Image (tube, rainbow, N blue to C red):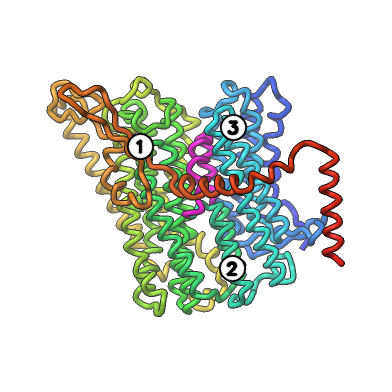
Amino acid sequence: MALGNMTDPAMLVLFSATLAALSGVPGLFLKNAQAVAQKLAVFLLVIAVLAGLSGALAFLLHGTPVTYTIPCSLPFAPCEIGLDQLSALFLLPVLLISACCSIYATRYWPAANNQRTSSKLTFFFGLLTASIVLLLMARDSIIFLVAWEVMALSAYFVLTTEDHKPEVREAGIVYMVATHTATLALFAMFSMLRVAASSYQFSAMAAINPVTPLAAAIFCTALFGFGLKAGLMPLHVWLPSAHASAPSHISAIMSGVMIKTGIYGIIRVLSFFPHPPLWWGITLLVAGIASAVLGVAFALGQHDLKRLLAYHSIENIGIIFMGIGIALIGQATGQPLLTVLGMAGALLHTLNHALFKSLLFLCAGAAIHATHTREIDRMGGLARSMPWVAALFLVGAVAICGLPPLNGFVSEYLIYLGAFSGANTANGPAVPVMALAAPSLALVGALAVACFVKVFGIVFLGSPRSRETAHTQEAGWPMRAPMMVLAAFCAVIGIFPLLAARLIQPATYNWAPGLVVTGRTIRSAAPLGWITVFGLLLLALGVMLAVIFRRRTGQETVGSSVTWGCGYLKPSPRMQYSASSFAGMIVNLFAGALRPHVEKPVIAGPFPLQSRFASHVPEAFLELVIVPFFKAVDERFSVIRRLQHGQLHLYILYVFVTLCLLLVWAM
């Protein structure tokens, strides 16, 4: 189909991508007016987002899948883009969070104070948003890979904004190696899809035989490539350092949006196989359980606030993969209830995670902006000077822990229902895995609660632990307003999940069209109406308790004292819980996987010298497996470096010998 007019929802989305890509261009030329360029970029991006959101919402509710052929061609195939309900659903968080982060940046990363980096950051931020939108609209392998590479490079440049810092450069290198390793896997996957479907167009890949060895190879390369981008354990090696080193609004869009392209990719590829083998679903479910449990365990041992949030992204990616695995098991065993619950839970959790994780990163950025440190143990007592940020962080914390009445509870509830239903109705090798899913998800929720009790208690409660913390100010409205918008969406979805179900249902049917015949819907599979009732009751109870507490404290004389005085005459901030002491017992339970490093104090003699205690949870897979492997390879192949001696005539000889060998091989 040829390109339509601008009233077409797909054309609105395409216009949105174009305007977003151009939003940062003025900053490249207005070198002496960076503040004006930044505001202009935000204005253009917000216009782009409004156009894209209106198109995506209209299409999601009333549209039918459509594909357009752009009047230009690539070497391998015609250039096709399109829109369906699955793409439209993923567009919603991409556009919303991009707008929130761009507005947030005007106060968090003002151009007036960051002349060296502002134009670069603004330009590649818009390009990152545009590339993700184009990736979601791609309807052939070539456009998909082009958009994927633009997204990867744009993310690298925004990640390394502070490239004068060694740790940022190192994080950028790890990210670049990881993302191009994923790209190589996708090249192999799309090449095999080309062989299986005899075309690069997605429309020709609608019904590939899933029981062939080629299909198994496609599944494995897709899991590796997209899992590496999504941060699935143990393919997560780039994610903690990248999220910690990037500016906080960039961390928000990377965690909330960019890693979801890995989720979109695996879901899109799985849609090419209407009847997948059972072992595919079991594999994804097991991988999701491992990623969720280990992700939250690693998060508990962190001292860096943003690195802790990054590990929670790994945890939630695992929860999403659990939902996808349950959906695949339902397809393989002919149980539409499992398919609906699993895929609806996965898609809704993708949307929910984008909201509450972006909220948490923006709140963390506000705290870091005020204290100039990411170390949890150097913060404390921020709720007094930053009550808005504390309250909004608490909303995000409750949501990410899967507690009612916020949105994280709804999506995890759907996955719980799928796991319980599968354990009761499944047979064969899927039974033990399905039976393990529900208690694993419960364990993840409990550990997440413990982790965020630690974070909120140490960062926002208690007494200030450093000079920087003692003199902080509330975040300005350009930072607070985006956080309030995200918190409002977390509350609306959590209290009125039927509204979210109306958005998720078309995408679920689009992924598995056979569900339409069965008549299974999200509303019939889960009692979402009762969630609204109990959510409103819980909200009313909370308001009532707050009013009672307010009245009682207003009528009585209330004394004040240092938090956690514990009866000491002169308590100091050092007597408070630290990140290590709070999580020490749980970290020890997972010591086999976390490999914590502990430096214990040495106390000897009746008058011991000053000593210290320190603990560190390393990135175990990166530091203990990948880095030693590459060092060993480097040592084994170091002899080859002798061939690089700088003598041109020998280089020409190498080329000549290579050509001769190729000619002999071709004969």
Q: Please, what secondary structure does the residue beneath circle 3 have?
A: loop
- Residue identified by numbered label 1: 391
- Residue identified by numbered label 2: 271
On-image quarter of the C terminus: bottom right
Residues at circles 2 and 3 in contact by the CB criterion of under 8 Å = no
Position of 657 with respect to 164 (left or right) is: right
Q: Is residue 16 visible?
A: no
Residues at circles 3 and 1 in contact by the CB criterion of under 8 Å = no
> Which residues are drawn in magenta?
233-260
- Residue identified by numbered label 3: 161
Residues at circles 2 and 1 in contact by the CB criterion of under 8 Å = no
| Residue 251 among those drawn in magenta | yes
On-image quarter of the N terminus: bottom right
Specify the label residue 268 is tagged with.
none
* Foreground label between 3 and 1: 3
Q: Is residue 58 above or below residue 237?
A: below
